[in-house]
Amino acid sequence: MSTRQYSSDQVAISWAGLDFQGGLAQGSFVTEARTAGSWTQRATLSGGTIRSYNADRTGTVTVLINRESQLMVDLLVKAAEDRLNRDVVKPMVVKDVSSGRTMTYVNAYIMTDPDEVWATEGQDISWVFAWEKITKQAPAGSVPNIVGS
């Protein structure tokens, strides 16, 4: 099985009016993580298991940003705005431009200001966004049941 390679210029990300193009770091620049699994299980008295659906659809998406980019400045401004007004909660859309696959992170917000490293060379900074739920849209012509929320 081959692994799909992504280039930051082939992934479009937008959130709260910001276009992330030009500010994404190279390498693994987007990482999605769910807070909890879709299913949990527990043992029964007879030694079997019961599978239960977990309604928790929350998670995080971490985006690696080039520290020297304008996007870094724009995100710092949005974080300050959110601390002041507590209302910067917007959908984050991540689209693979080459295939058309789209992920929408509903009600995404900056979890906290990022940890920074001061060094003699430019550092990439991880911005962590929390989200309420995610919807994934497969590219046109693909098998619909391979993509879930």
Image (cartoon, rainbow, N blue to C red):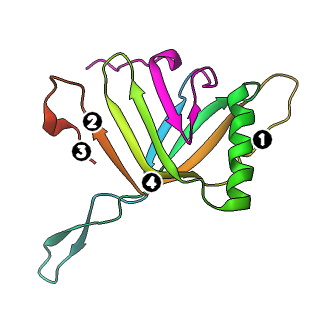
Q: Real-space Cα distance between discs 3 and 1?
A: 34 Å
Q: Which mark is residue 126?
A: none
Viewer-closest of 146 and 90: 90
Amino acid type at mark 2: Gln
Give the mark nearer the N terminus: 1 vs 4.
4
Gap in Å between the C-alphas at discs 4 and 2? Answer: 18 Å
**SS of the residue under disc 4:** strand
Residue beneath the point at 52% across and 53% down: 130
**What residue lies at 36% left-to-right and 37% top-to-bottom?**
103
Q: Quadrant of residue 147?
A: top left
Kind of residue sitting beneath label 1: Glu
Q: Position of residue 13 (x, y in %)?
A: 49, 31
Q: Main secondary structure of the magenta part?
A: loop
State how far apart marks 1 and 4 are (Cα).
22 Å
Which residue position is annotated with label 4?
59
The image shows residue 8 at horizontal and vertical percentages of 52, 20
Disc nearer the start of the sequence (3/4): 4
Q: Secondary structure at mark 3?
A: loop
Report which residue position mark 2 lands on.
137
- In primary-sequence order, the first of circles 2 and 3 is 2
In magenta segment, residue 4? yes
| Mark whose residue sits in front, 2 or 1 | 2
Indicate the amino acid at tag 3. Gly
Say few, some or many: other residues with alpha carbon within 10 Å of mark 1 (under 14 / 14 to 19 / 20 or more): few
Q: Which residue is mark 1?
A: 116
Q: Residue at x 35, y 19 (%)?
A: 4
In the displayed structure, 142 sits above or below 56; it is: above
Question: Counting other residues with Cα less than 10 Å from the Cα at mark 2, is it few (<14), some (14-19), or many (20 or more)?
Answer: some
Q: Is residue 28 magenta?
A: no
- Classify the position of the N terminus by image quarter: top left
Question: Is 47 placed above or below 102 here?
Answer: below
- Name the residue beneath numbered marker 3: 148
